[in-house]
Amino acid sequence: MITRTGARNLITDVAGLRVGNAGDARLRSGVTVLAADAPFTAGVHVMGGAPGTRETDLLAPDRAVQQVDALVLSGGSAFGLDAASGVAEGLRDMGRGFAVGDVRVPIVPAAILFDLLNGGDKGWSDNPYKALGRTALADVSEEFEIGSTGAGTGATTATLKGGLGSASVLLPDGSTVGALVAVNALGSATVGAGPHFWAAPFEIDGEFGGLGLAQGFGDPMQAPTKLAHHANTTIGIVATDAALTQAQCTRLATAAHDGLARALLPSHTLMDGDLVFAAATGARPAPDLAAQVLLGHAAACTMARAIARAIHAARPVPGDLLPTWSERFG
């Protein structure tokens, strides 16, 4: 069987999932929301040294709440955590949420990246992220843009403009794995000063240029970073239609971090808040042990591809601090 992507090559190839984006060009920041037709099981794993999160403690396997209503990725550093409040309010208006008596409490874990030093207007008097979160929720669809949008609006890497990426893969047993990621890494997604992506071995159908492997890799100890700017973090989501427990979702998120390490050099640093959520809709049967191993491997490979697609799809706008991949390499 030839490895192939889902119909959209987006995380929404996992049936029932939808993604919404909202961005503010003047702010140079934005929000991305993953929602679903029904509550879904979720887990999380943090590998970065500087994370910013909301309600991730609820995702531990021993907690009372086993499913969530949405997941949020946001710019704005700690201010961006308020995006989840806007999403929760929107979900409550839809009648969604964990039932406590006659009250509904939407469960909306969130993670943020630091994009406060990217040249945008950050002199607001009222935090804009709550409204951006609500707008992103209203925008959810099976079709969505990648590149300079949503949580990736103002993202950067060490050498190029960052962005929002997504990818999917169909597995031999019929299940689907998808990834969604906002790439604002301390390190670089490309090899040295050239156009080749670290994620090249995992590319499918030329989805980020089809350049193949770099001809040389230089000194791996001389990896470029944007350490002086302290403006980092890659946050993402992997999803599957397989039926997984919260513990199995946590393991899937852990495996997906290998995708960050394969696509970004360096990754998981003290100045990154690298985090991956995992989501399982349960539309397909629970996997056996061998299938769980394949799911983890697919999550890592798909995350690596989504990272490269984010950089490849980034669009230039006036005032960018770094060039896009397309500007530099065509």
Image (cartoon, helix red, strand yellow):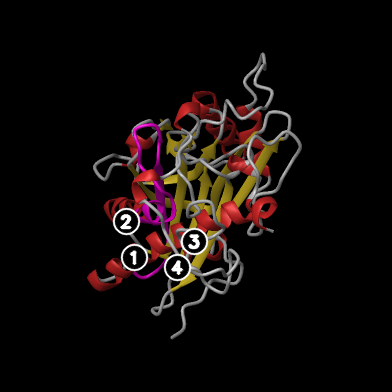
Q: Residues within 10 Å of mark 3 (few under 14, many from 20)?
A: many
Q: Which residue type does callout 3 highlight?
A: Arg
Q: Residue at x 30, y 39 (%)?
A: 64
Q: Are marks 4 and 1 in contact (CB under 8 Å)?
A: no
**Which label number is shown at residue 98?**
none
In the structure shown, which secondary structural element does the residue marked by tag 2 occupy? helix
Q: Are marks 2 and 3 in contact (CB under 8 Å)?
A: no
Label 3, on which residue? 305
- Closer to us: 68 or 172: 172
How much space separates mark 1 and mark 3, taking CA atoms? 13 Å
Disc 4 vs disc 1: which is toward the camera? Answer: 4
> Which segment did they paint magenta?
258-285
Q: Residues within 10 Å of mark 2 (few under 14, many from 20)?
A: many
How much space separates mark 2 and mark 1, taking CA atoms? 7 Å
Q: Are marks 2 and 1 in contact (CB under 8 Å)?
A: yes
Q: Quadrant of residue 118?
A: top right
Mark 2 or mark 1: whose residue is earlier in sequence: 2
**Which label number is shown at residue 297?**
1
Q: Residues within 10 Å of mark 4 (few under 14, many from 20)?
A: some
How much space separates mark 4 and mark 3, taking CA atoms? 6 Å
Mark 2 or mark 3: whose residue is earlier in sequence: 2
Q: Is residue 151 above or below residue 54?
A: below
Label 4, on which residue? 202
Label 2, on which residue? 255
- Closer to us: 17 or 112: 112
In the structure shown, which secondary structural element does the residue marked by tag 4 occupy? helix
In the structure shown, which secondary structural element does the residue marked by tag 3 occupy? helix
Visible residue check, residue 56: yes
How much space separates mark 4 and mark 1, taking CA atoms? 11 Å
